[in-house]
Image: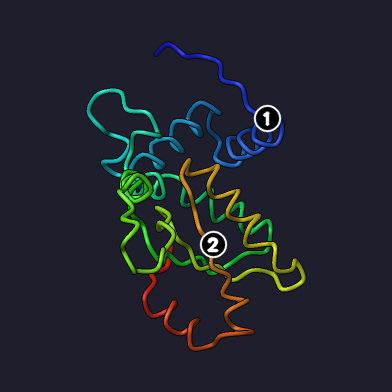
């Protein structure tokens, strides 16, 4: 089998080398096994017919592909218990924004719903701006607009809203 060289950072190289030593196998086997497991856990998403870019995937598939990475990055910022409040589609939000606004309509304006809404328990000592920082991180990972609702904020200021949010959400 022909092999190719890939570039990884020092920490990843060290982890691959340590795993290969521990398993008494080659680094190539460790990487191949990890990739096979990654593809198996994500099922049909990584086996899409034709060449599809990440941005062309539905938002739900992007969230499924980046789930572990999102959990890891949030955990580094002490954000835990990530729950999904809503997963829509980028096109739905774009159509809402481009919709015709009737000036005679008496209904109050409501902002379009972002494609992804997450309920996250944030670290209290990081302050109220942590939800916005997590939104930026999640938006960059998923390449779509994300709204983070802080379960910590709701716990402190609106317990009934927290209970409703937990009831209407599912664990990531």
**Which residue lies at the image location 61% right of the left edge and 21% below the top edge?**
7
Pick the residue in front: 45 or 39.
45
First in sequence: mark 2 vs mark 1: 1
For residue 9, which numbered disc appears in the image? 1
**Residue 146 percent coordinates (x, y):** 49, 53
For residue 1, which numbered disc appears in the image? none
Residue placed under numbered mark 2 in the picture:
148
**Residue 103 percent coordinates (x, y):** 35, 57
Q: Identify whether 107 is placed above or below 141.
A: below
Residue that extends furthest to the right in the rendered view of this protein: 125
**How crowded is the residue under tag 1: few (<14 C-alpha within 10 Å), some, or many (20+)?**
few
**Which residue lies at the image location 58% right of the left edge and 70% below the top edge?**
150
Pick the residue in front: 132 or 67.
132
Residue 121 falls in which quadrant of the image? bottom right
Left or right of 144, for residue 150: right
Q: Nearer the viewer, mark 2 or mark 1?
A: 2
Residue that extends furthest to the front in the rendered view of this protein: 104
Q: Identify whether 136 is placed above or below 19.
A: below
């Amino acid at each position: 089998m022909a092999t190719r060289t890939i570039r990884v950072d020092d920490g990843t190289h060290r982890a691959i080398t340590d795993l290969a030593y521990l398993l008494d196998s080659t680094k190539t086997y460790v990487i191949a096994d990890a990739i096979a497991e990654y593809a198996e856990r994500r099922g049909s998403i990584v086996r899409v017919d034709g060449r599809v870019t990440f941005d062309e995937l539905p938002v739900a598939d992007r969230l499924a592909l980046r789930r572990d990475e999102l959990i890891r990055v949030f955990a580094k910022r002490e954000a835990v218990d990530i729950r999904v409040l809503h997963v829509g589609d980028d096109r739905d939000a774009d159509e809402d924004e481009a919709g015709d606004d009737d000036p005679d309509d008496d209904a109050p304006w409501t902002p379009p719903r972002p494609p992804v809404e997450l309920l996250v328990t944030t670290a209290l000592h990081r302050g109220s701006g942590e939800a916005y920082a997590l939104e930026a991180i999640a938006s960059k990972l998923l390449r779509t607009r994300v709204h983070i609702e802080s379960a910590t904020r709701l716990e402190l200021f609106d317990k009934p809203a927290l209970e409703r949010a937990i009831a209407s959400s599912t664990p990531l």
